[in-house]
Image: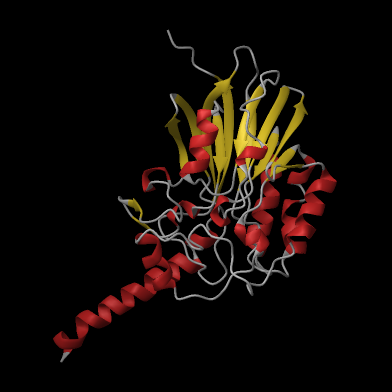
Amino acid sequence: MRARYGIPLGIGAAALAGLGYAAGFEARSFRLRRATVPVLPPGMPALRVLHVSDIHMVCGQNKKRHWLQSLAGLRPDLVINTGDNLSDPDAVPELLDALDPLMEFPGAYVFGSNDYYAPRLRNPARYLLEKVSGRHGLNGNPAPSGVPRNPWWEIQEAFDDTGWANLTNARARIKLPLGEIALTGLDDPHIKRDRYRKVAGGPERDADLSLAVVHAPYLRVLDAFTADGYPLILAGHTHGGQLCVPFRGALVTNCDLDTDRVKGLSAHEHGGNRSYLHVSAGCGTNRYTPVRFACPPEATLLTLVERRETA
């Protein structure tokens, strides 16, 4: 009898322990990633860019709120927010409280689908199987009618009032003591709100640096930015895979990006050009799947330095 039931009970206990770790510890184990990116013109001083993404704020997430507030101690030169700020329509005040210290610094933002639409309860197993089979959430289509909306306009008003640049299918320039930064952004490709034609034309040559910003790193967007010659693209959306296999990595990216580039700094090549790509693993989760495994929540401090000259 003991042999008959011992193995299933052991597997069940291990699964419960893993779930408890993923939801109770790792999903709240916030950390800072650091990376150095050689993209600045010769002679320009190093530039520190704080990249935050996929906060997915839910009411009562005090540890996340205090951790985000603490990032202001890094004193970044520029803050880039790549969207999916909400996972609870009532959490706007707590989101803005969390970001208030960071909004003292120059910044820019784009939105993701979860800024516009409230999450829905779904079967997590079915959700994961869809991703593995290549279906990406809304499958790249606009949200169907009847999906509850989040109060994204309240976030936009607060960000705009503080001076953060709205990059929703738009360009902007930010003057910093270290130089002038031109930014080009797109609305979320995950729900087909990106309109590259509105911002086409490539980097602004009279700026000291041009950056590209988008929520979801779909290949069509990365190809367009890279072909136009942007040296660095910032994105989020993937959650770093969220549920990863130790020593193997992510199973899914929730878009058509390959799993090898699901988070962190990598490269993208297209049209004879090469861009750096930084994908944030984000610091939150959908409120109905509040777990992370082998993929802790994060923000990234990018130190931009002079580009390497090739012979």
Direction from residue 276 to residue 172 in the image, left or right: right
Using the image as rendered, state which of residue 276 and residue 293 is in the foreground: 276
Whether residue 195 is visible to the viewer of this picture, yes or no, is: yes
Residue furthest right as drawn? 161
Using the image as rendered, state which of residue 273 and residue 241 is in the foreground: 273
Establish if 187 lies above or below 140.
above
**Residue 33 pos. (x, y %):** 52, 42
Residue for point 51% across, 63% down: 138
Establish if 171 lies above or below 147.
above
**Residue 59 pos. (x, y %):** 69, 69
Residue for point 54% across, 49% down: 216
**Residue 204 pos. (x, y %):** 67, 23
Residue for point 74% across, 64% down: 151
Residue furthest top as drawn? 311
Residue for point 61% across, 58% down: 113
Establish if 66 lies above or below 183.
below
Whether residue 74 is visible to the viewer of this picture, yes or no, is: no
Q: Quadrant of residue 272?
A: top left
